[in-house]
Amino acid sequence: MPNHVTGYNRTQITLHWIIAALVVFQFVGHEAIVDVSALIAKGQDPAIPILARAHVLLGILTLILAIWRVVLRLTRGAPDLPAEESAALKMVAKITHLALYGAIFIMPLSGMGAWFGGQEFASTVHLTFKFVVIISVALHVAGALYQQYVLKTGLLKRMMKAE
């Protein structure tokens, strides 16, 4: 059972921001992998550009870091949501985090299945979960900003300064 913690440690904070940056990169640089995949689907054997290679490798790195992050969360724990937050907002936060964690695991796994295994189902899952990532990241950011600037709970400080 994790200890009760009031904040995140340096490793948890660093992993959060690295994974966030990797997710942003994956969206910004995804066009190269889409182009290569389209050529492969047509039976061509294209040269694979560095951005497409980076998409694959950084997707795998995202999965590894996400596993590390979840292990830390399970062993070290995470701070409670602000006490003054309503039960409804706490539920939205928990669902959003669950969706975000799930998508951060499903995206690299389905991407590997599509890229290395050529599985059409994996490709469909990968494309579908792109929208889960977009929605859950948007909710995550909106919720954090709402907590910080409207409710003034100081929530953002937990991901900026180690305990």
Image (cartoon, rainbow, N blue to C red):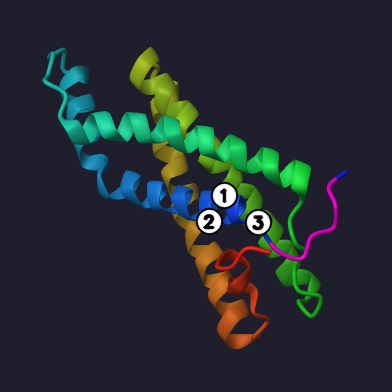
Name the amino acid type tagged 1: Leu
**Magenta stretch bounds:** 2-7
> Alpha-carbon neighbours of circle 1 within 10 Å: few (<14), some, or many (≥20)?
many
**Secondary structure of the residue carrying numbered label 1:** helix
Instruction: Kindly report the secondary structure that dominates the magenta region of the rendered protein.
Output: loop
Residue in front for this viewpoint, 123 or 13: 13
Q: CA distance from mark 1 to mark 2?
A: 6 Å
Kindly identify the residue that appears in the image at 81 percent across and 75 percent down.
83
Q: CA distance from mark 2 to mark 3?
A: 23 Å
Q: Amino acid at mark 2?
A: Ser
x%, y% of residue 135?
A: 48, 57
Q: Nearer the viewer, mark 2 or mark 3?
A: 3
Circle on res. 9? 3
Q: Which residue is mark 2?
A: 136
Indicate whether residue 89 is drawn in magenta. no
Q: Classify mark 3: helix, strand or loop.
A: loop
Task: Please determine whether, in this image, residue 153 is positioned above or below residue 27.
Answer: below
Identified by mark 3, the residue type is Asn
Q: Is residue 8 left or right of residue 140?
A: right
- Residue 106 at x, y percent in the picture: 52, 34
Rounded to the nearest angstrom, the CA distance separating label 1 from label 3 is 20 Å
Residues under numbered marks 1 and 2 in contact, where contact means CB atoms less than 8 Å apart: yes
Residue 92 in picture, x, y percent from top left: 68, 63
Q: Which residue is disc 1 drawn over?
A: 100
